[in-house]
Amino acid sequence: MYFTVAQVRFNRLLKLSDFLPNIQERLRQQRFPDFSTHKSFVLEVNLQPGTSSAAPVAVAVERHQFGDTPQTQLFLLDQQSLTLQSTDYGDFKQFSEIFLRGLNILHEEVRLDYVERIGLRYLDRVIPNEGDDLYQYLAPEVTGLSRKLPGQKAYAYSESVNIVDQVNLLSRVSIQSGPLVFPPDIVPGQMNVNSRLATYVGPNAILDNDGSVDGRHEFSIDTVREHLTAIHDVIGNAFHAAASEHAFEVWN
């Protein structure tokens, strides 16, 4: 695993900047001292009643970053979401507790009203041992025709969307040869990635599992924790479905 993301989307906080000094100080005390603010632009489309189309409008978004000293954990905060990115996952209990502590700090400062989306995403890089074929590590269902076709295997991609109880799961597998790559919607910035996973160049597969629970409900740390656990369990099943028995024998 080389990258993990947890995110909660909540009611818009137009006065977020008023609370920022206290939030920054409390996260600094939680070993996230590296603070910075960045601005970017997103396109918003607002349909008015009685209209079928609208021109997109560029809207400036200010995002605050709170990083740890080793540059392996990074909180991202804007007016509608809190995100934790990690390249040093550890295990689910450790990662989720770090995220929930940050979310609780935010709640204690601003008093969040409701949550609209809870998400969890895992990026795993599968690298074969010397002498092994990459396809030995993958379930046949995710390899497509590339496993059977002759010639050099340049690229293969599979995608599956499933709804498991309340969890929306988007499971993607890309097979390629080359250096480590990130999906276009993931920006790691200056975060440090595990050197073995970052420096390897050759046949590899990226298992990208993205789960979420959508729907508005009153804010509660316990509810967020429960949904994160449910998403983690669904993603765990997807990971086990994409990898082969040989892979787990090697990894264990």
Image (cartoon, grey):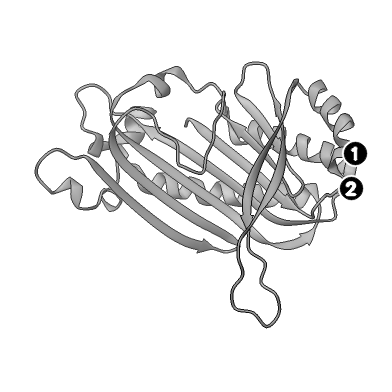
User: Dot 1 corresponds to which residue?
Assistant: 18
- Label 1 CA crowd tier, 10 Å (few <14, some 14–19, many 20+): few
Q: Is residue 83 above or below residue 220?
A: above
Please give the name of the residue rendered at 59% of the width and 39% of the height, measured from the top-left corner.
5
Indicate the position of residue 166 as horizontal and vertical percent values.
Answer: 60, 62
Q: Is residue 58 left or right of residue 14?
A: left
Q: Are marks 2 and 1 in contact (CB under 8 Å)?
A: no
Residue 85 on image: x %, y %: 61, 34
Badge 2: how crowded within 10 Å, few (<14), some, or many (20+)? Answer: few
Q: Identify the image quadrant of the C terminus.
A: top left
Distance from disc 2 to disc 1, alpha carbons, whole Å, reads 13 Å
Residue visible at 40% across and 49% down in the picture: 172
Q: Give the label, 2 or 1, closer to the camera.
A: 1
User: As shown in the figure, which amino acid type bears the numbered disc 2?
Assistant: Arg
Dot label at residue 27: none
x then y, percent, for residue 11: 79, 55
Q: In which quarter of the view is residue 126 placed?
A: top left
Left or right: residue 44 versus residue 224 is left
